[in-house]
Image (tube, helix red, strand yellow):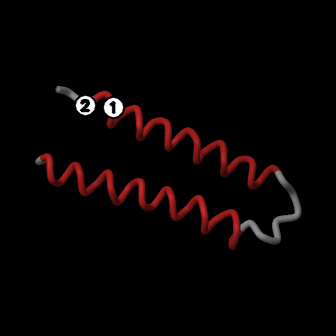
Amino acid sequence: MSLEQQRRFWVIFFTAIVLAAFILPFYLFDDLPKIYGAFLFWCIFAVVAIIGVGVITSKWRE
């Protein structure tokens, strides 16, 4: 993959993550009777975001 393709992938990836952080909890989990469904989402969200940032920073060279 070229640098431009990688950049486009990561921009789309993090845009999707940010949109999911707003759309899922406030619209899809709005009437969820139990809290652990939302807690599971935030745990998975955090792990995906941390892995994404880890991959980006591991490839970052001067």
Residue drawn at (25%, 31%), measured in percent from left and top? 59
For the residue labelled by badge 1, is the local secondary structure a helix, a strand or a loop? helix
Hey, which residue is sitting farthest right in the picture? 33
Dot 2 lies on which element? loop
The quarter of the displayed image where residue 56 is located: top left
- Circles 2 and 1 in contact, beta carbons < 8 Å: yes
Residue furthest front in the image: 62
Toward which corner of the image does residue 26 lie, by quadrant? Answer: bottom right
Q: Report the front residue among 17 and 37.
A: 17
Residue 14 screen position, x and y as percent: 42, 54
Answer left or right for 4 relative to 31.
left
Other-residue count near label 2 (Cα within 10 Å), few / some / many at <14 / 14–19 / ≥20 = few
Q: Quickly name the residue at label 1.
A: 57
Residue located at (76% from left, 54% from top): 37
Q: Is residue 3 above or below residue 8?
A: above
Percent coordinates x, y for residue 52 in the rendering: 41, 41
Residue sitting at x 87%, y 57%: 34
Relative to 24, 56 lies left or right: left
Q: Which residue is mark 2?
A: 60
The quarter of the picture where the C terminus appears is top left
The crowding category of the residue bearing disc 1, from other C-alpha atoms within 10 Å (few below 14, some 14 to 19, many at least 20), is few
Amino acid type of disc 2?
Trp
Gap in angstroms between the C-alphas marked 2 and 1 = 5 Å
Instruction: Kindly identify the amino acid type of the residue bearing the numbered disc 1.
Output: Thr
Left or right: residue 59 versus residue 42 is: left
Q: Quadrant of residue 16?
A: bottom left
Residue 18 position, x and y percent, is 51, 58
